[in-house]
Structures are given as structure tokens and as C-alpha cells.
Amino acid sequence: MVLTEPIVYKNIEGLKEIQDVVSFQEEIWGKDAVTPLPQLIAAAHHGGILIGAFNKGELLGFSYGFSGYKNGEAYLISHMTGVCSKYQNYGIGLQLKLKQRNWAVDYGYSKIVWTFDPLEARNAYFNLNKLGAYAKTYYPSYYGEMTDKLNIGLPSDRFLAEWDICSNRVKNTLAV
């Protein structure tokens, strides 16, 4: 696949584009794992972030996050990031995370967290080595029995990625 036009990254707030994100989620994970339209609309309009990657108007990937608060600390929860399989290995996922990071810094966050499957070595490498996040918390069966088309029959154990987005560690990792 050759991209002839540049990829455009932008915040998504309009109904049509949010509906496209819902359909996109269904393509990747199936209907069982979709963040519903009303939730995405509410989050996009009230403190959350929904970023899309587009090529010629086609949605190639997205990242969705919302605010979290625990033990006196506010942070952004990066709940979902997905890239269409035929557009993987173009750096789209990295750019989505970097756009999310820039947004989070602009809104006063110093940390972003998300969970990832410890059996997915590619995701672990991306999260820990490319982004400079760390994992010190392990959740066995975090989501319980999952039935979506990517995870059916697999354990839902997860690591919690913590990304101190303003730290020297992250700045140095991203500078490479």
C-alpha cells in the first residue's frame, strides 16, 4: 500500500466522524468491544480526546482518551488506539500517541495510562521502548472473559502502561 497524500491528524468532534470511529472499531474488534457513540460524543465534548488519522478523508486510525483520577493524581486514560491493518507500519500509531501526548500536555496532564496485553510483544516493545512508558502493575483477567474477534479465547491479563509524558526519560526516548 502506497500513500500518495499526506496523513492528516486532527481532533474529532463532529457527529459523522465520531460515527466513523464507531464503525472503525467494529471492523477491528467487532461489535462486542465498541465504545458507543454517545460515550464518544460526551467525552469529545467534555474533557476527553478523540484523534483521527485521515488520508483523502478516509479514517486510517484513531486514539481515544478520557480523564482519570486516582490517589490524588489526575491523568489521561488512553482507552483505545487502533490503526487499520493495511496501514500498519506507516508510523500512524506512533503519531496518534504523540498527538495525544501533545494534547495532554496542553491540557495540564503529566501522565497518560493505558492497559496492554502482556502477550503482545509488538505492543510491549512500542509502549515501553518507542514511547518510554513503563509497566509496574499487572492485572490478571482485567476484562474477564472477552468475546470480541481479536481476543476471544485469550486471557485478558493486562499490564498498566504509565507514560510520564513530561519526564526526561520520555523526552530522551522520543528524541531518538
Image (cartoon, helix red, strand yellow):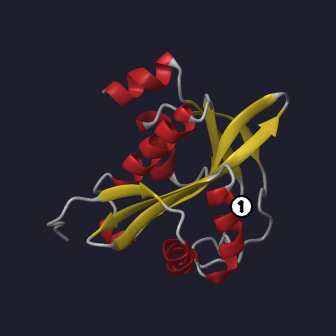
**Residue furthest out toward the top:** 168
Eyeballing the image, is 168 above or below 26?
Answer: above
| Residue in view at x 78 percent, y 58 percent | 141
Quadrant of the image for the C terminus?
Answer: top left
Q: What is the x, y in percent for residue 107?
A: 59, 35
* Residue at the disc numbered 1: 156
What kind of residue is marked 1?
Ser
Q: Is residue 17 left or right of residue 87?
A: right
Q: What is the x, y in percent for residue 173?
A: 40, 26
Q: Quadrant of residue 174?
A: top left
| Residue in view at x 84 percent, y 27 percent | 72
Eyeballing the image, is 47 above or below 37?
Answer: above
Q: Quadrant of residue 50?
A: bottom right
Q: Is residue 169 left or right of residue 80?
A: left
Eyeballing the image, is 5 above or below 65?
Answer: below
| Residue in view at x 71 percent, y 45 percent | 67
In the image, 85 versus 106, the foreground residue is 106
Q: What is the x, y in percent for residue 79?
A: 64, 55
Q: Quadrant of residue 31?
A: bottom right
- Count residues near mark 1 (Cα–Cα under 10 Å), then give few for <14, some for 14-19, many for 20+: some
In the image, 156 versus 53, the foreground residue is 53
| Residue in view at x 54 percent, y 63 percent | 13
Label tally: 1
In the image, 120 versus 95, the foreground residue is 95
Quadrant of the image for the N terminus?
Answer: bottom left
Q: Secondary structure at mark 1?
A: loop
